[in-house]
Image (cartoon, rainbow, N blue to C red):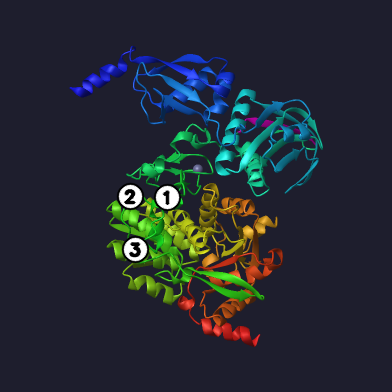
Amino acid sequence: MADNQEILFLSDDSARMRVSIRLFATLRDRAGVDQTEIELPNGAHVADLLPALAAKYPLIEPGLSTAMVAINQEYAFPDDKINPGDEVALFPPVSGGSETEAPDHFAVTTEQLDLDAICSAITIPETGAVCVFSGAVRGSTSTQDGVRSTDHLYYEAYQPMAEKTLRQIALEIRRKFPGVQGVAIVQRIGELHVGETTILVACSAGHRNGGCFEGARYGIDRVKEIVPVWKKEFGSAGEEWVEGHYRPTPTDTGRDDKSKSAIQASNDGSEFFALACPECGESYDANFDGFKCHCGGALEFAKTPTFDRVLIDANRFDLWRYKRFLTPDTIGPITLGEGWTPMIETIHSGRPILLKLESMNPTGSFKDRGAAVLVSVLKAQDTPAVYDDSSGNAGAALAAYAARAGMQAKLYVPASAAPQKLAQIRVYGATLETVDGPRSEAAKAAEAAFDRGERVYASHIWNPFSVFAHRTIAYEIWEQLRGNAPHTIVVPLGHGSQLLGMAAGFEELLQAGLISQVPRLIGVQAAACAPIYESQQAQVASSELPTLAEGIRIIHPIRAKRVLQAITRSLGAIVAVDEQEIVGGIAALAHEGVLAEPTSAVVWAGLARVMSDIPEGAKIVLTITGSGQKTYGIDKLVAQHAVI
Ligand SMILES: [Zn+2]
């Protein structure tokens, strides 16, 4: 009865062991002892040892992330078991490469902040650049209700935890931007007056392209999310505590530092597809039966696999070249040969540019990427039927891949949808449910069907697989440019799933140290319906007027905030183009032999808006998201343009 023995064993108090540990070099200095004892449960692993040691010697913690562990004079790793009587040793990486320990400086203080002191604290002989973010008390703030003036602020902190989270942020910065050498984050607390410095976030690097700008930017964003510091504002509106909206999740604790690569070892999909809501922080397991968070937020995967170039399947020339970053090993692809689309050269305003022809995917649009991955996963779960709401490219993609997988598909479509688009969906064998009213009514019908128990709602909008799959466009562009990122990428912007996917893909490449910066992402909206563009211009009212670019006529983009963040992080921009410019784009592309649908053609005029900001010689990529073969009367549109 092995099971019983196990239970008895675990409930036995004597099932703990004392482990003797030797400490060397900086770790010994930090702990103040060269030998110590730690109590651990029998069967504990190396991964259990480090938190126990940090709890006993808090000062040692900053050194643990790079510490090496040896058991009985052999290197040991997080999953290795520790046995009673083992000789355990901890030490920093041995001298050989750089002997300099990465310098850090963290403080939560009532003292005035000294910029020079902070910069010199993180400058080592190898440092060539320091980038500092400095935050100050603002005296006047524009709000929807007019201008609010501030006299002074009072900052309060939960100090020990604040200092601990600052250290955690430094670890995150180093992981994301390996070129960063030193990190300093200093938060001032107490009473602060207008113009005084409240916070400094500084990163040093060997060179300005070593990630110091990005590290400082990431650092201040994270401080605003997870460091327990609050401010009370005193001014024209009286006095008021200012609270943020971010709610930290378990992934913010830094506790899972050591499980970073576990996702790639996981085979059953349970960890691969666990979900999290970035709005409220709620997490859901892979079997979650809803399509959105209870707070209304759009869910994302809690973790994405880490990009590693050696895991590319170099023998495949389609989307599944990147299978290791898309699905667990046990899932076989349902494929029509999607992905690995061509990238061709052309000329725009006298300058060479590249067109990524997503229109050459099997059903004529980039939506095939998300549909292929989602249907592959659902097929592996023996899903008999899927449904979605769409009248265009996403509907065609789901219908095609469902047909390929032998699954039933149903699409809720607006009764007014273009007949030729419906014909494509129908001929793949999908059922059409027509819904009166605008596009949003079809979405409501699909949600009502969900409430009635219809399954599986394979929403290309809510479902995180779309954004997830579009990461592969970034990988492909990087490979097609022989391991380089372009300077600028211009994409049509509706809900923003392609833009977010590309941003994620390039950020993974950056983290893997394969590119030095994420390309500038330029999102192009149709002026007739440009809610994200207008929100950035601080205009309140948005219109939902008809536009030729029907695929991006999205008045309520569900991930608008994340789209704005991704564009800002990339130093990109959002532009809006009018109907005349859209038709001009179709004509210009067609004259190069590229047939783009109006939704895709927005990128041509979009590039014209930002061209003067792009340095000569910089690589520019436009994505042609969908084929003009589906656009009825495209010849007449262009002829009309020629007359005008
Ligand atoms: Zn939520």
Q: Please, what is the three-letter code of the amino acid marked with disc 1?
A: Phe
Q: Earlier in the sequence, mark 2 or mark 3?
A: 2
Residue drawn 31% across and 52% down?
331
Question: Label 3 amino acid?
Answer: Thr
Q: Is residue 491 magenta?
A: no
Type of the residue with mark 2:
Asp
Residue 272 locus on image (x, y percent): 39, 45
Instruction: Residue at the far top: name it.
Output: 14
Separation of disc 2 and disc 3 at Cα?
15 Å
Label 2 SS: loop
When the figure is inspected, residue 227 is found, relative to residue 57, above or below; the finding is below
The x, y position of residue 155, in whole percent, is 72, 29
Query: Which residue position is annotated with label 2?
Result: 329
Q: Position of residue 594 (x, y in %)?
A: 52, 77
Observer able to see residue 3: yes
Closer to the camera, 482 or 249? 482
Please name the residue that numbered disc 3 is placed on: 335
Label 3 vs label 1, nearer the camera? 3
Return the mark for residue 291: 1
The span picked out in magenta is: 227-235
Q: Residues within 10 Å of mark 1 (few under 14, many from 20)?
A: many
Which residue ends up furthest to the left in the rendered image? 1
Q: Is residue 277 left or right of residue 327?
A: right
Residue 389 at least partly seen: no
User: Where is residue 7, by image quadrant?
Assistant: top left
Q: Quadrant of the N terminus?
A: top left
Q: Is residue 228 magenta?
A: yes
Mark 2 surroundings within 10 Å by alpha-carbon count, few (fewer than 14), some (14 through 19), many (20 or more): some
Q: How many marks?
A: 3
201 or 294: nearer the viewer = 201
Q: Residue at x 49, y 65 (%)?
A: 439
Residue sitting at 52 percent across and 75 percent down? 596
